[in-house]
Image: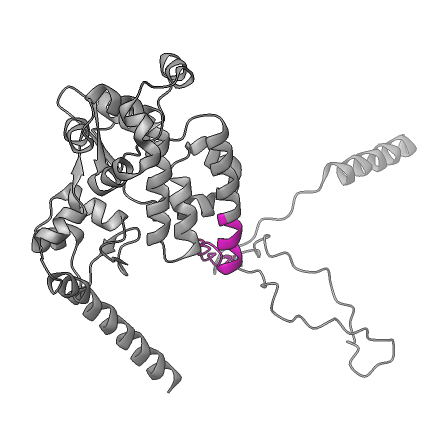
Amino acid sequence: MFKNTVTHESTALAEQITAARDESVAPSRAARELGLKRIEWDIAVQQGRVRTVSDETERGRRRVPRAERERLRAEEGFPEALREEVRTVGTTEGAALMEITKARFTRLARLGLLVPVAFHLNRYRAVVWLYWAEDLRQFAADDRNTALLRRRMPQGLLKQLDAGLDLRPRNWRGGYLGRLLRQCETPWERAAAVASLLDPIHVSDVVKDPHERSHLRALRPAPPAQGPPGSPAAHIIESITTAGEGDETDWLRADLAAETGTARRHSPAPRPLPEPRAPRRTRLGTVPAHVHRPHPRTVHAGHPKLPATRPGPPAHADRPAPRPPAPGRRRAPARPSHRHGGALRMLLGRLRRGRS
């Protein structure tokens, strides 16, 4: 009865997962249904405008439920209103939106005052930063930023720019991590999101258990952009998506240690099952260790079970028994040994000397 109950519960759970998967679709299909480009879809998910759920069958994958797609379609002004909310612009369009020059826009972005939300590489492998249009409107509308937009930039900021300061990659990583953490549903997913921005050497230094590191890799979110492995484009993307040395790495290492500790207390990382050990093979003629062997009993003289004759030496299993002679064939007499033949010759010699 218990076996039937477990089977019924497992079947019901599988049916629930299948039904939920049938009602949800992959992000690429959801973007097509909502009329969004790939970059617009990424921004909508990262900004929390579209809710996604984890895939029950594939780790690290996300899906979009039917109810979420229907909710977005029912909003007023769909799809133009949704597309305008997640619209991104590059440097040229962003400068025109804020009514400043492209050079000033780039300086503000390098100083970390304008935070990019996405990037991609063009055909010349140059990094193209994208900014949320609504964020630029709010920055331009704030009266406290008038001096930065209309007046000469302070000398202290210009010196930092001349020294090569560029906070766009770091600010993108900070915003990207925040958006990833808002989508996480479990402590292990939060730890994997933090680990995705660290070099594998730092992850191995913080997380010592190889099974936990394997679990973090399985939950690692898909990179926002990628190129062929080992290509120049892949190296450029890796330099942007990986934290640089310094206080940023220290902060992420501390955050990874805290998130991993929370995940361990919540649930341990899965580990592979031990391989079944093959049964030990016993040699023919030996008694296994688990078989009970009775202890020999001591029989005293005069005991009724004492044998009348003295037992001979124990038989050896490895010494074959002598063959019986063939019928009709006489056995040759045994030849005397050398010791008995020498004594007989000495006796005959004495008799001969006595006669003579």
Is residue 53 in view from this perspective? yes
Residue drawn at point x = 25 percent, y = 58 percent:
51
Name the residue furthest right.
354
In this view, the residue in front, 290 or 294, is 290
**Residue 109 visible to the viewer:** no
**Residue sitting nearer the eye, 49 or 262:** 49
Residue 85 versus residue 353 in the image, above or below: below
- Quarter of the view holding residue 20: bottom left
Residue 139 spot, x, y in % from top left: 28, 37
Taking the magenta stretch, the answer to whether it contains residue 242 is: no
Horizontal side of 99 relative to 270 (left or right) equals: left
Q: How many marks?
A: 0
Question: Within the image, what quadrant is residue 11 found in?
Answer: bottom left
Residue at figure coordinates x 18%, y 46% from the top left: 86
Give the residues drawn in magenta, as a range: 259-283
Q: Relative to 338, is 157 on the left or the right?
A: left
Q: Main secondary structure of the magenta part?
A: loop
The quarter of the picture where the C terminus appears is top right
Residue 71 drawn above or below residue 10: above
Location of residue 119 in the rendering, given as x and y in whole percent from the top left corner:
23, 32
Residue 35 located left or right of residue 220: left
Residue that appears at 73% across and 63% down = 312
| Residue depicted at 20% across the width and 32% down the height | 98
Residue 125 % position (x, y):
19, 21
